[in-house]
Amino acid sequence: MRLEGYISRADRGDAGQLADLCIVAFEGKWEERLLILSTTDVKERVEKVLEILSRQLGILQVSKKVNQNVSNKLTKQQRE
């Protein structure tokens, strides 16, 4: 089943379940994923997931900025 199906059926009031779904979807090391999934304290698990998602967001923002800069430079070079 696709991740969207799991998310749509998930209990939105269950923070632990939502954290588990997020950690499964993120791109990272298996060891890090397993460490988080094995954390029994829900608050601690959610905090770890938020930390990872924040880190992933930062990487994506930098990547987007680099891609935009490269695209702008290529467009400028093509005009010249």
Image (cartoon, grey):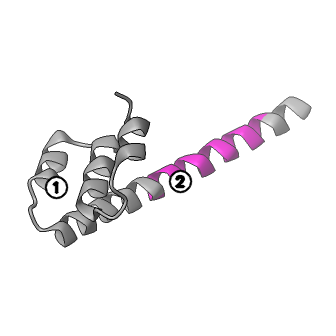
Give the side of residue 68 with respect to residue 76, left or right.
Answer: left
Can you tell which quarter of the image residue 45 is in? bottom left
Q: Position of residue 37 (x, y in %)?
A: 15, 51
Disc on res. 36: 1
SS for callout 2:
helix
Give the side of residue 44 with respect to residue 66, left or right.
Answer: left
On screen, residue 49 above or below 66: below
Can you tell which quarter of the image residue 74 is in? top right
Dot 1, how many residues are within 10 Å of its Cα: few (below 14), some (14-19), or many (20+)? Answer: many
Residue 68 part of the magenta segment: yes
Callout 2, which amino acid? Val
Dot 2, how many residues are within 10 Å of its Cα: few (below 14), some (14-19), or many (20+)? Answer: few
Image: magenta residue range: 58-74
On screen, residue 10 above or below 3: below
Residue under numbered circle 2: 62
Callout 1, which amino acid? Ile
Q: Residue at x 28, y 62 (%)?
A: 14
Q: Name the image quarter holding the C terminus.
A: top right
